[in-house]
Amino acid sequence: MFSISTFLNSFEPLLWAARYTMLISGLGIALGLVVGALICAAALSRVAALRWFAALWVSFLRGVPLLVQLLLCYYLLPVVGINVPAMVAAVATVGICSSAYVSEIWRGAIIALPSGQAEAATAIGMRPRDIWARIILPQAFRISLPALVNELILLVKASSLVSIVGIMEVTRASQAQAATTFRPLEVYIAAACIYLIINLCLAALGRYLEHRMTV
Amino acid sequence: MDLSILLQYWPILLKGFGLTILCWFLGTVFSMILGLIISLAQRYGPRPLCWLIQVYIEIIRGTPFLVQLFVLYYGGPLLGLRLDALPAGILGLSVYGSPYFAEIFRAGYLAVPLGQLEAARAIGMSEPAIIRRILLPLSLVSALPALVNFSIILTKETVILSIITVPELMYRVQRMSTETFRYLEANLVLALFFWALVETISRLGRRLETRITRHLIERT
């Protein structure tokens, strides 16, 4: 029933496609970190309009399923006159979606710092800019690292949805492979194994960071 | 922008929405029950069972929901498991959610003060009674925010069922947009709709949370 040779043979094309899975989730988290930092700064700012914008941003991106965001972006971009390859649209959507989660992770990390730290820094006469650059941000970054690795794991899984806009990552490649071999069971289990391996490695990295970086 | 198609298609969309709610509700209930069983088995079961459960949790949490659905729906028949799209979708959702719920319950058990359990044992309560009257009620209260939170996440996962042709809202919207060529409007409306849905559910969830915890704080 379960054909081991089909199972093993499907690894080759799937591992080839795994580059795209890793590329999309890697670029996605990179974009998410940059945009997430901006959104987090807006959420913590003194200007009410910025805080309001950040709240709206986070609420929308966390409230709408990624699949819907993906299709929305895919159909919206040509209408507003932006013609980009599907790959760019996919990375942008995944990254922008993760920015909402990243900004919340960073906001949580900054809030979690004991306020005495900033007060002590003020008391010894540090400028606000130095307090942020040398006291708050380095510590908040360390606290947030395990959560960020977790977010990356979520992105690896979320990148499977990108298959429906036609990008040849692991899921799409396994659909193609299943269609040619007529053995969906083996092929999809092989795809699951690839995701599992990637994510177990990331989870190990997360545990290591948690162990080392705990402040 | 032309929203008149919505007027024409609303009965179909409403039907799809009904199915979305059904999938979400059954998926949440089943995965919560499964998660509860898993978490209790992990707490009280023998060692080998715990290892098996740990492997199950890692596999389900480490693979995308979409791939799990493909294995179940397209791979299942090779093992003699022939399901229609809807039961396969609900089963998939239940399996997918169960390890997350199990972890939430497990964290809830850890939050129960040890003294309470020891006191119950000291006055001679049987272990099932302790689970039923001490462990579960106390842990459920502390786990409630996380339970509500994950249930909301599951509403968003239901759209993925459209890919294995479960005719829920997302599927109907895609059908509508291919019939009318109004892809942008259809997806925009769908996005706004989900945004409103998730916001409403999370407001209700927060209200439920404060209500339940307040009630217990007053009593104890």
Image: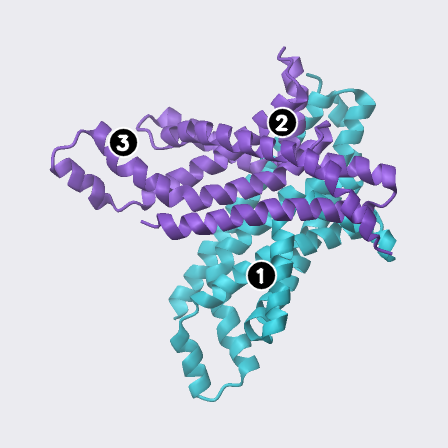
Chain colours: A purple, B cyan
Q: Residues within 10 Å of mark 2 (few under 14, many from 20)?
A: many
**Left or right: residue A159 compared with residue A117:** right
Q: Residue at x 84, y 52 (%)?
A: A3
Cα distance between the residues tagged 1 and 2 = 32 Å
Please, what secondary structure does the residue beneath circle 3 have? Answer: helix
What is the chain identity of the residue bearing mark 3? A
User: From this viewpoint, which residue is outermost toward the top?
Assistant: A81
**Left or right: residue B148 compared with residue A174:** left
Q: Residue at x 48, y 51 (%)?
A: B207
Locate residue B7: give its quadrant: top right
Q: Residues within 10 Å of mark 3 (few under 14, many from 20)?
A: few
- Say what amino acid the circle numbered 2 marks: Ala
Residue placed most toward the observer, B11 or B25: B25
The number of discs equals: 3
Residue placed most toward the observer, A25 or B199: A25
Q: Residue at x 61, y 30 (%)?
A: B192
- Say what amino acid the circle numbered 3 marks: Ala
Please, what secondary structure does the residue beneath circle 2 have? Answer: helix
Residue A58, relative to residue B51: is it above or below? Answer: above
Q: Tell me the number on the disc at residue A133.
A: 3
**Left or right: residue A121 compared with residue A21:** left
Residue B170, relative to residue B154: is it above or below? Answer: above
Q: Residue at x 66, y 14 (%)?
A: A79
Q: Tell me the number on the disc at residue B102.
A: 1
Q: Which residue is mark 2?
A: A90
What is the chain identity of the residue bearing mark 1? B
